[in-house]
Amino acid sequence: MREGRYAGKGYRQLLIDNYIVIFRINEADKTVYVVTIQYQGRNI
């Protein structure tokens, strides 16, 4: 991630339809920690 509160802290993002998922991976434990799921819908 390049911008925002999670930028540069090892977090990743996943876009699914109108949702964005912010998560972090612990490779040693093989665990994924989901930090937040946010709706990013738009009316055009």
Image (cartoon, helix red, strand yellow):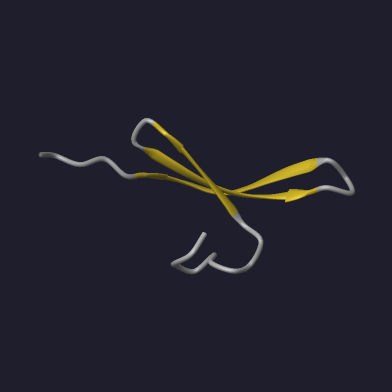
Tell me what residue is drawn at x 79 percent, y 42 percent.
31
> In the shown orientation, is residue 42 left or right of residue 34?
left
Residue 11 placement (x, y as % from top left): 62, 57
Name the residue at the left extreme: 44
Q: Is residue 2 above or below residue 34?
A: below
Q: Is residue 29 above or below residue 10?
A: above
Residue 39 placement (x, y as % from top left): 35, 42
Q: Is residue 39 above or below residue 9?
A: above
Tell me what residue is drawn at x 20 percent, y 42 percent.
42
- Please state the total of marks drawn on the protein image: 0
Tell me what residue is drawn at x 34 percent, y 36 percent.
18
Q: Nearer the viewer, residue 11 or 36?
A: 11
Q: Residue 6 appears in which quarter of the rendering?
A: bottom right
> In the shown orientation, is residue 6 left or right of residue 29?
left
Tell me what residue is drawn at x 10 percent, y 39 percent.
44
Residue 8 placement (x, y as % from top left): 59, 69
Q: Nearer the viewer, residue 12 or 42?
A: 12
> In the shown orientation, is residue 1 left or right of residue 24?
left
Name the residue at the front extreme: 2
Name the residue at the right extreme: 28
